[in-house]
Image: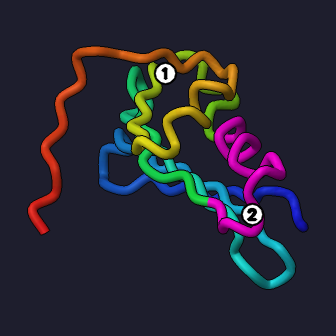
Amino acid sequence: MGAPHRRSRTPGSTGAWIAVCHFCLGGDRLVGFARAISDGAANAYISTVAVLPEYQKRGIGRKLIQRLLEGRDHLQFVLHANDSAYPFYLHLDMGFEPFDNILVRPRKF
């Protein structure tokens, strides 16, 4: 399995919003993916972390998140996890803490 790869994109004319994506390949197959969106100044949101079930428990998700966080200590990261993934993120020991005052507007479809 290859090392995680990185793709970055800064859309818009101001360059204010930055999307950073990392992915992991197993041969010619995408087996893991992580994405963060940031204003580049103060805040970032980890919007997606996914690893194929047969590749889980190999450290791929952990490595993908590490890559998202690398060199970005000046940003506050927010990560919303579903109930089944929540324990995984608590045990990463990467500084994520439970937070009480998060509001969510769910999708309507």
Q: At x 31% / y 44%, what residue is drawn?
A: 14
Tell us which disc is closer to us: 2 or 1. Answer: 2
- Snapshot quadrant of residue 98: top left
Q: At x 53% / y 16%, what residue is drawn?
A: 74
Q: Main secondary structure of the magenta part?
A: helix
Magenta residues? 51-67
* Residue occupied by mark 1: 75
Q: Is residue 81 left or right of residue 103?
A: right
Badge 1 marks a residue whose secondary structure is loop
For the residue pair 59 and 85, the one nearer the viewer reads as: 85
For the residue pair 5 and 85, the one nearer the viewer reads as: 85
Q: Is residue 55 left or right of residue 7?
A: right
Magenta highlight on residue 39: no
Assess whether mark 1 and mark 2 are in contact (beta carbons under 8 angstroms).
no
Image quadrant where one finds the C terminus: bottom left
Query: Any mark on residue 24, and which?
Result: 2
Q: Position of residue 70 (x, y in %)?
A: 69, 31
First of labels 2, 1 by sequence position? 2
For the residue pair 3 and 102, the one nearer the viewer reads as: 102
Q: Residues within 10 Å of mark 2 (few under 14, many from 20)?
A: many
Q: Is residue 87 left or right of residue 103?
A: right
Magenta highlight on residue 53: yes
Tell me if residue 28 comes above or below residue 101 in the rendering. Answer: below
Measure how far apart labels 2 and 1 are at the Cα level: 24 Å
Q: At x 74% / y 81%, what residue is drawn?
A: 29
Q: Residues within 10 Å of mark 1 (few under 14, many from 20)?
A: some
Instruction: Specify the amino acid type for callout 2.
Output: Cys
Q: Position of residue 4 (x, y in %)?
A: 78, 56
Q: Position of residue 95 (x, y in %)?
A: 60, 16
Badge 2 marks a residue whose secondary structure is strand
